Image (spheres, grey):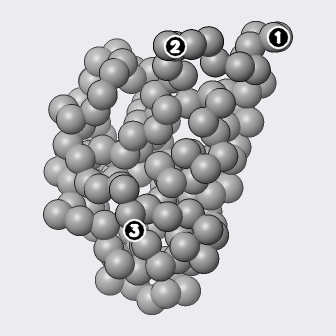
Amino acid sequence: MAEGFARAYGMDVLHAQSAGLAPALGVVSLTHQVMLEKNIDLSDCYPKRFEDVEGDVDLIVNMSGYELPTLLGAHVEVWEIRDPIGESEDVFRQVRDEIEQRVKQLIERLRSRKPAGSEAISAGAQPAVAEVDTRRRPTRQ
């Protein structure tokens, strides 16, 4: 979900790739469904291992609920997000909406750090990569 929102709203300031240390086998169909309600198609998204991430990583957003090993010297931001797997459609929508708001806030923070006159990404330059660890974790009560 975070990768989809980041691609939809923040391509001018980041290059999002979702990855985890122990990724799921696939994206749950209910995730696809609730994201389509926001006009975001995740059909080209799939769970990846962190090792499969392309390019340098500046930021990791950890939603796994677990401590991460130090990875590539990237800054780690922890988001306490409920895992909706096995929950109702309503829970998926609540989680989707929370992730959407957090991604928007992250994008606004990144935009506020951009130097003046840098609205356009120069040819060949890659924006910062924001990683999201979506590894399956126990549901918090």
How far apart in space, not on screen, are marks 3 and 2 (Cα)? Answer: 35 Å
Q: Is residue 72 above or below residue 17?
A: above
Q: Residues within 10 Å of mark 3 (few under 14, many from 20)?
A: many
Q: What residue is shown with label 3?
A: 83
| Residue drawn where x is 57% and y is 58% of the image | 99
Q: What residue is shown with label 1?
A: 116
Is residue 85 left or right of 51 when viewed as pictured?
A: right
Question: Identity of the amino acid at label 2?
Answer: Ala
Does dot 1 land on a helix, a strand or a loop?
loop
1 and 3 marks in contact (CB < 8 Å)? no
Q: Quadrant of residue 56?
A: top left
Residue 24: give x, y in percent of width and height.
Answer: 21, 61
Is residue 9 left or right of 25 when viewed as pictured?
A: right
Question: Identity of the amino acid at label 1?
Answer: Ala
Q: Nearer the viewer, mark 1 or mark 2?
A: 2
Q: Nearer the viewer, mark 3 or mark 2?
A: 2
Q: What residue is shown with label 2?
A: 125
Does dot 3 land on a helix, a strand or a loop?
loop
Mark positioned earlier in the residue sequence (1 or 2): 1
| Residue drawn where x is 39% and y is 40% of the image | 17
Q: Is residue 130 above or below residue 20?
A: above
Mark positioned earlier in the residue sequence (1 or 3): 3
| Outermost right residue | 116
Q: Is residue 95 visible?
A: no
Q: Residues within 10 Å of mark 2 (few under 14, many from 20)?
A: few
Does dot 2 land on a helix, a strand or a loop?
loop
Question: Identity of the amino acid at label 3?
Answer: Asp
Residue 6: give x, y in percent of width and height.
Answer: 56, 45
How far apart in space, not on screen, are marks 1 and 2 (Cα)? Answer: 17 Å
Residue 53: give x, y in percent of width and height.
Answer: 28, 33
Residue 7: give x, y in percent of width and height.
Answer: 55, 45
